[in-house]
Image (cartoon, rainbow, N blue to C red):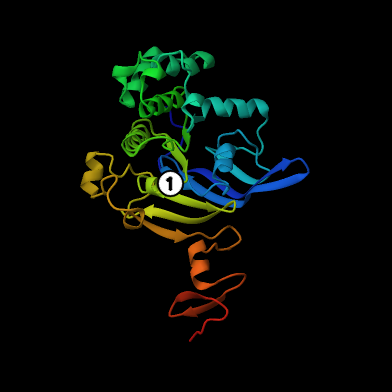
């Protein structure tokens, strides 16, 4: 995959600042994103997690060029998604980004073989290359299934074909919306391993949207969205910089660095969690903290021994 001049793994690839998305439904306005801030580095494998209605799918649609931001900044690989016209947006979706959806029927055409499904985006884009199509199926571990139709493949195999399809036109960004949501744990693990493998092989940046915290421990980093804003971030406990290879990917570099194998431990053991500040310095406290300490609309901030202490209004303090 060709790399843009000056583009290096670990550079800022996605930057969102005070991102707002408002949907109009009849006479109502729904604010799906409420001043969201996010940075994703080139070559990262990261997840966006959140409950239904948190804004994570809206963010995916904005990053994929399917929705236009209402306000704020959304830049992907130097492209300002707020300022491109319809023709530029169409080219962006065809060339810069690849999609993997939860619903397999949205990814595959049922009467085509796996190989033909991968070839189709190339034919449409005028870049047909059967050798590359075969290489992509080999990269996702399905070289022995390339002439099978989806009906003769398992759900996990169909999702791996979908990843190959998403890579057909050499995108720089791979977006996946709940890609393991309909799979059992074994197939889900295989699909996640494929995301790791293609990230390492092709240098693509991978952003996965999910509500499943258990899946989050398989990625380099995950960011939680709550009420249309990023609220917390967890980074793998390795001390390595983002984008320096996949944890548990089986590579020699990972083994030498002592990175944990995939699937070992829970997210609290494999990742260190941080609460995020937005561009205005605002802080979102985790919901369970608020409930546990009876915090509603205000807190007291004090400085103690170089620390900032957050205390509910009625609590005693030193």
Residue 255 picture location, percent across and down:
22, 45
Q: Is residue 239 above or below residue 109?
A: below
Residue neighbourhood size for the residue with mark 1, other residues' Cα within 10 Å, grouped as few (<14), some (14–19), many (≥20) = some
State whether residue 244 appears in this view: yes
Task: Check the picture and name the quadrant holding the N terminus.
Answer: top left
Q: Is residue 187 left or right of residue 8?
A: left
SS at mark 1 in the image: loop
Q: Which residue is mark 1?
A: 212
Depth check: 307 or 147 in front?
A: 147
Q: Residue furthest bottom?
A: 318
Residue 225 picture location, percent across and down:
53, 51
Residue 315 picture location, percent across and down:
52, 81
Tell me where residue 47 sits by quadrant.
top left
Tell me where residue 84 sits by quadrant.
top right
State whether residue 286 appears in this view: no
Residue 220 picture location, percent across and down:
37, 47
């Amino acid at each position: 995959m060709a790399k843009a001049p000056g583009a290096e793994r670990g550079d800022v690839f996605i930057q969102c600042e005070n991102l707002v998305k408002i949907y109009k439904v009849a006479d109502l306005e729904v604010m799906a994103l409420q001043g969201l801030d996010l940075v994703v580095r080139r070559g990262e494998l990261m997840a966006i997690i959140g409950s239904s209605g948190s804004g994570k799918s809206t963010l995916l649609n904005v990053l994929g060029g399917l929705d236009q931001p209402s306000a704020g900044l959304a830049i992907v690989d130097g492209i300002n998604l707020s300022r491109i016209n319809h023709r530029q947006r169409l080219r962006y979706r065809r060339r810069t980004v690849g999609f993997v959806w939860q619903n397999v029927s949205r990814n595959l055409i049922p009467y085509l073989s796996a190989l033909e499904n991968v070839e189709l985006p190339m034919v449409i884009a005028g870049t047909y290359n059967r050798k590359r199509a075969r290489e992509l199926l080999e990269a996702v571990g399905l070289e022995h299934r390339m002439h099978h139709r989806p009906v003769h493949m398992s759900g996990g195999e169909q999702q791996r074909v979908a990843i190959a399809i998403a890579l057909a036109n050499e995108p720089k960004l791979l977006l996946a919306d709940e890609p393991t949501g309909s799979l059992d744990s074994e197939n889900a693990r295989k699909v996640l391993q494929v995301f790791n493998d293609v990230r390492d092989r092709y240098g693509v940046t991978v952003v996965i949207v999910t509500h499943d915290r258990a899946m989050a421990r398989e990625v380099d980093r995950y960011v939680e969205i709550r009420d249309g804003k990023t609220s917390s971030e967890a980074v793998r406990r390795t001390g390595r910089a983002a984008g320096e290879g996949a944890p548990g990917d089986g590579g020699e570099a990972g083994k030498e660095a002592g990175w944990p194998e995939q699937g070992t431990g829970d997210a609290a053991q494999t990742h260190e969690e941080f609460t995020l500040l937005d561009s205005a310095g605002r802080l979102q406290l985790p919901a369970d903290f608020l409930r546990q300490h009876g915090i509603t609309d205000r807190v007291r901030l004090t400085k103690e021994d170089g620390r900032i202490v957050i205390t509910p209004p009625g609590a005693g303090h030193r």
